[in-house]
Image (cartoon, coloured by chain):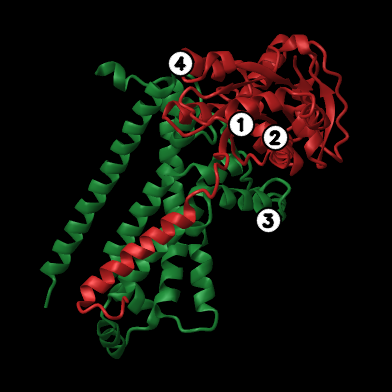
Chain colours: A green, B red
Amino acid sequence: MVELLHLSVEEVTAVRLSLRVAFWAMTASLIPGILLALVLARGRFWGKALLDGLIHLPLVMPPVVTGYLLLLLLGRKGPLGQFLDEHFGIVFAFRWTGAALACAVMGFPLMVRAIRLSIEAVDSRLEDAAATLGAGPVWVFLVVTLPLTLPGIIAGMILSFARSMGEFGATITFVSNIPGETQTLPSLIYTLTQIPGGDAGALRLTLISIAISMLALLAAEFLTRRLARIFRANDF
Amino acid sequence: MVSRMHSPMTRDLVISVLLVLVSVAWTAPVSAQAQKLIVFAAASLKDALDEANLTYQRKTLQETATSYAASATLAKQIEAVAPADIFISADLDWMDYLAKRNLVKPDSRANLLGNRLVLIAPVNSTAQLVIAPNFPLAQALGDGRLAIADPNGVPAGRYGKAALESLGVWSSVTDRLAPAENVRATLALVSRGEAPLGIVYQTDANSDKGVKIVGTFPENTHPPIIYPIAVVAASTNPGAPGYVAFLKSPVARPVFEKQGFTVLQ
C-alpha cells in the first residue's frame, strides 16, 4: 500500500505543476469571470447572445482545436503572442503560463455560468433598497450583490479548478508535454499510458488526481456552508 | 386495412411492427456485400494509406474505415477488444506487445514499410546543420526548443532519442525539448514556426510544404524504422487477408514510395 503512494520525482513535479497551473488558472479567471457574468446577467445590449456564445465556445469545441487556436494566436509566431512578448515580456509558448492559460480558457465558460446563475438569483429589490439608501451602483455591487453571489463564485472557482486539473487536449497541443514546465498530471498520465507497462503508474496518478479534486470539492462545500450560516445569522 | 382496426392500440402496434420490419429490411445488406474492413494504422501513414485504400476500393469494392492515431493508443484499444481487423504499427515494439498477448494472427504478420528519420526546420529557416557525431544541435536551437514526438512512448520520438543518443547530443538537448503528442503534431509545431527544429519521419516532412529537411539521420544511428502489419486475432472479416496481400503487392508499392516510404520485401 505504501509503494502505491511512493511517487517518483517526475510524478511529484507533475502534481505540483498541476496544482500551480490550476490555482493560477482559477485565480486569473476570477475577476474577468465575475465581470462577464455580471454583464450577461444584468446587461441588455446588442450582441449579448454573441458574447454568450463566444464564452461557451471552449465547451463545444474539441479541446485540441481550442489548443490549436491558442497556438495560432498566442504562440511565439502568433500575432498576440508576439505583441505580448515584445511589449510586456509575457511568453506563453512552452511555458507553465501557457498551460495555465489553456486551463483558464477551458474552465472559463463553467465559471461564468455558475456565477451568472448566482447573480441572477439575487433579489434585485435588495439592490434597489440599497440604492434608495444612497449607495452608488459600484458600492451596491460590492456590498450587496457580491456577498450574496459568493456561493456561486465558489462553485465557479471549484469548477474552473477541477477542469484545470483534468485539462489535457488543449494543453498538450498548445504547449506540448515538457516535464517540469508543462507536463501536468493529465499529460503525465497520458504519457504513462503510451509506454508498455506504464498502466500501473497511470492508475496511481489518476487516484491522486481524484483525491485532490475531492479535497477541493470538500473545501468548497465547507466554505459554502459557513457562508450560509453567516447569512442566516444576519437574516432580518 | 389498418384504418379499419377497432382498437387504436392494436393499430399503433401493427404500424410499429411494420416500421421495424421495414427499417430492418432497409439496412440489411442487399447482397453478400463485403463487410467493411476496420484498419487501425499509425498516424504517419495517413496520406499514403488513404490513397491505397481508395485504390483497393476501386478494384475490389471493399470498403475500409481507417483510424489513425499513435501506435500505443491503437494497441491499447485492440487490447481492450476494439473491433479492428488490421493493425499497422509504426514500430515493432507495439506489434510485439500485441503478439505477446496473442492478439494478432502470427502467420499474418509481416514487415510492410520502412521510413527514414529527418531533422526539419520551417521552410524559410536559414539553419544549416550536418548530422554527424556531436553536431551543434543545442546551439542551432538558440532559445527555441526541439520539437519531437514524445520520446517516452511514441515510436518517432523513440527513434529520435536513439539517434541523438548515438550521436552523443542527447544530453545537450534533454531540457530543450518540446515533446508533442504524435509525429504529426510535431510537424505542425515546426511548420508553424513555433519550434526552430524538429525530428519527424521523411514521409511527414514530404507531406508538409511548410517545412524543409535540414538533414537525414544515418540509418545506423537508430533501430530500423519498420512498420509491421498484422490481422487482429479477434477479426472475423474474410476480407482481411486479401487486404494485407494487396498492401504487400506491386500495385500498392508506388503509392507508398510516392510518399517516401521504402517498401520492404
Q: Amino acid at mark 1?
A: Ala
Mark 4–mark 2 Cα distance, whole angstroms, equals: 26 Å
Q: Position of residue B17 (x, y in %)?
A: 32, 62
- Residue at numbered disc 4: B102
- Residue at numbered disc 1: B41
Q: Residues within 10 Å of mark 3 (few under 14, many from 20)?
A: some
* Mark number displayed over residue A20: none
- Residue at numbered disc 2: B49
Q: Which of pointers 2 and 1 lies earlier in the amino acid sequence?
A: 1
- Residues flagged by tags 4 and 3 on a common chain: no
| SS at badge 1 | strand
Contact flag, marks 3 and 2 (Cβ < 8 Å): no
Disc 3 chain ID: A
Question: On the rendered structure, is A219 left or right of B191?
Answer: left
Q: Amino acid at mark 4?
A: Asn
| SS at badge 2 | helix
Q: Amino acid at mark 3?
A: Leu
| SS at badge 4 | loop
Contact flag, marks 4 and 1 (Cβ < 8 Å): no
Disc 4 chain ID: B
- Residues flagged by tags 2 and 1 on a common chain: yes
Mark 3–mark 1 Cα distance, whole angstroms, equals: 37 Å
Task: Relative to B256, say whether B47 is above or below.
Answer: below
- The quadrant of the image that shows the N terminus of chain B is bottom left
Who's the residue at 44% across and 26% down the image? B79
- Residues flagged by tags 4 and 2 on a common chain: yes
Who's the residue at 52% across and 72% down the image? A51
Question: In the image, which is nearer the foreground, mark 3 or mark 2?
Answer: 2
Contact flag, marks 2 and 1 (Cβ < 8 Å): yes
